[in-house]
Image (tube, rainbow, N blue to C red):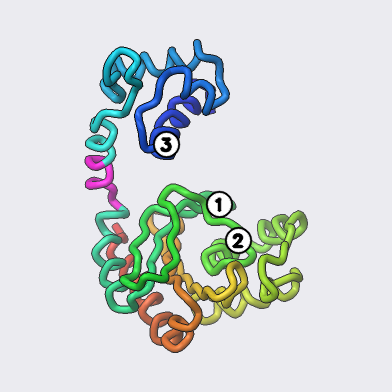
Amino acid sequence: MSKIVERTLDCFELFADQHRPLSLSEMAKLLDIPPSSCHDVLQALVKRGYVYELSPRGGYYPTLRLHEIATTIANHDPVILRAEMLLRSMRDAVDETVHLAKVSGLSATYLLSFASTHPLRLMVTVGDPIRSVHATSAGKALLASLGKAALDAWLAGADLTRLTPKTVASQAALREQLEEGKARGWFVNREESIEGVTTLSASFRWNGSLYIVSIAGPTARVEPKLEWASGLLVDVCKRMEMRTEG
């Protein structure tokens, strides 16, 4: 990715992180880039209407232009249009957080996240990648989609770091989990990535791409309804695949 693109994205993420107008010097310092480079990015964003200057020495802040464009894009996203109603309904039924991620190679990015109504819930940030694939149900769904050669190559360089006492720690154990998950049609993470948290995932394909749907919540709430929730999860993925054919 080019520096100008990275710095443009960094600017927007900085405003989201700081929650306030920022001066040119503040932005350059926080982003650790030369003031001249920061000035070039800011002026381009101002010219295109994405950022405005509150007043002389009053700092800069994004306009609503980016929000409006992002909303328009999201409202026409073919996957989200098809997935949103089904995933919201599943979230309402299980009352646990539901995620949708798209797989690309050996990584996956979260596209949607619907939170449960409980005060204690597990959230992800849309746009973030799935992490610790060996210890998460979504990661296992991803690994299970690989061919034998690709999985063998990944395992050859994999660092199966223990995140909790229950994290799978050997290639043999992970392979066994993947085979079990493929046989039943869904994958589970019982406190392997975060203590006290259980997640389950299943996948569907659309236009040659793989998508992963996950349910996540505290173990005490998820375990009693695991079998029922997993059946609902698999059914939703089958319906998504059927709805997206053609």
- The residue furthest front is 57
Q: Give the residue type that dot 1 points to.
A: Ser
Q: Give the residue type that dot 3 points to.
A: Gln
Q: What residue span does the magenta drawing correspond to?
A: 71-78
The residue that label 1 is drawn on is 107
Mark 1 falls on what kind of element? strand
**Front one among 90 and 123:** 123
Q: Quadrant of the C terminus?
A: bottom left
Dot in front, 3 or 1: 3
Residue 77 on the magenta span: yes
| First in residue order: circle 3 vs circle 1 | 3
Left or right of 80? Residue 146 is right
Q: Give the residue type that dot 2 points to.
A: Val
The residue that label 3 is drawn on is 18
Q: Main secondary structure of the magenta part?
A: helix
Residue 66 on the magenta span: no
